Image (tube, rainbow, N blue to C red):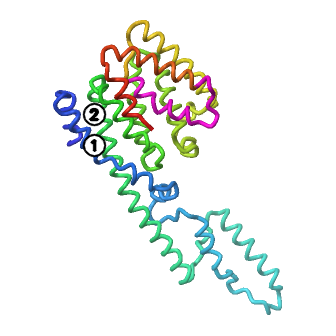
Amino acid sequence: EQISAISLLCSMKPNLFLKSFLQIAYERLQPASYLLVSKRSYEIMKTPPGEIYDKSVLETILKHETKDTGNVKRESKNYSYKEQMAARELEKELAAKQNKATVPQLTKKQQEMLQQQLDQEQATRDIVKKIDEDAKNVFEIFTNIVKSTQELFIPYLGELVAHIWPTLKSPVAFNYAKDLYIALVPIVFMNDKDTFGYAIAYLAVRLNSDPSTVQQQLDKCWLQEDLLAAIERLLACLYENTQQAKKFNQLSIARLDYCLPLFQNIVIHPKCTNEWTTSILNICREYFSAVSTSDPDVRFRFIRENAG
């Protein structure tokens, strides 16, 4: 209810409430805490309580299991020990096929080892769960504000992107940050073809995030194109798009704000070419020349806010 009220106030009186509520949300954003969560800890959080995440530990515990020989006796006169063990193994296989296999009876020592591991993972789960809930709540505030204000949010877009961008590197915040960044596409690319803005967004996310997280969390249709080929194709499209927008006097600094993280990740990419860098500089130059006439200070502010 509180989030709905915030969204309503921001949509009705953006000049009065939008900046204030965003500032409160920025203060609640904890990128340093999100980045401390390892992928292993995040996977433990997603594992149901009472179930061990680290199966290698479970295997170590079970190695202590006493060999189940039942009433097999080596001194049996009718059957050799080897024959009796083979029969017992066959019984186990048949029981397993009938889904009647029994759970190994753990020794007291094994039970203690198992409980110790469960306690350790539960402690990790509790810590990460709290961080996850905090991240979910603050990103929900951002998302609802964006969706309720739409184009009214444009003046605040660059600041939001700058705040959420580092959190894409955290497994606990990745999905929240990715969904919010993508939710901005209809605002920034409202006059373009449906897939163009989303292609830009997903490429930016791919370049800025852990590759294994990207493979697991992103829709496979956005991963089919080779990364380097996607960079080259979309830079060319962006430049052509910029030229068209300039012709119709539709250049907006919001689009540059949105694409800036993508440009930064391309420039620092180990396979970045001179052609890519030149394309990025040309795109930025067009935006600067278009908006600086109406706002002489925009070039200075842009460089200052995005330095480093």
Q: Residue at x 34, y 35 (%)?
A: 160
Q: Residue at x 54, y 45 (%)?
A: 210
Q: Dividing the image into 4 quarters, which one contains the C terminus?
A: top left
Q: Are marks 2 and 1 in contact (CB under 8 Å)?
A: yes
Per the model, the C-alpha gap separating discs 2 and 1 is: 10 Å
Residue 243 placed where, x, y %? 48, 11
Q: Alpha-carbon neighbours of circle 1 within 10 Å: few (<14), some, or many (≥20)?
A: some
Please name the residue that numbered disc 2 is placed on.
Answer: 145
Of residues 213 and 52, the one nearer the viewer is: 213
Q: Is residue 184 left or right of residue 266?
A: left
Residue 95 placed where, x, y %? 66, 68
Q: Dividing the image into 4 quarters, which one contains the N terminus?
A: top left
Q: Is mark 2 on a helix, strand or loop?
A: helix
Task: State which quadrant residue 175 falls in.
Answer: top left
Amino acid under label 2? Ile
Q: Is residue 21 left or right of residue 302?
A: left
Residue 238 placed where, x, y %? 51, 19
Q: How many labels does the image show?
A: 2
Q: Alpha-carbon neighbours of circle 2 within 10 Å: few (<14), some, or many (≥20)?
A: many
Q: Residue at x 47, y 49 (%)?
A: 171
- Above or below, comparing residue 211 to residue 254 in the picture: below
Mark 2 or 1: the one toward you: 1
Residue 263 placed where, x, y %? 50, 30
Of residues 240 and 293, the one nearer the viewer is: 293
Please name the residue that numbered disc 1 is placed on.
Answer: 25
Q: What stretch is highlighted in magenta?
A: 254-276
Amino acid under label 1? Ala
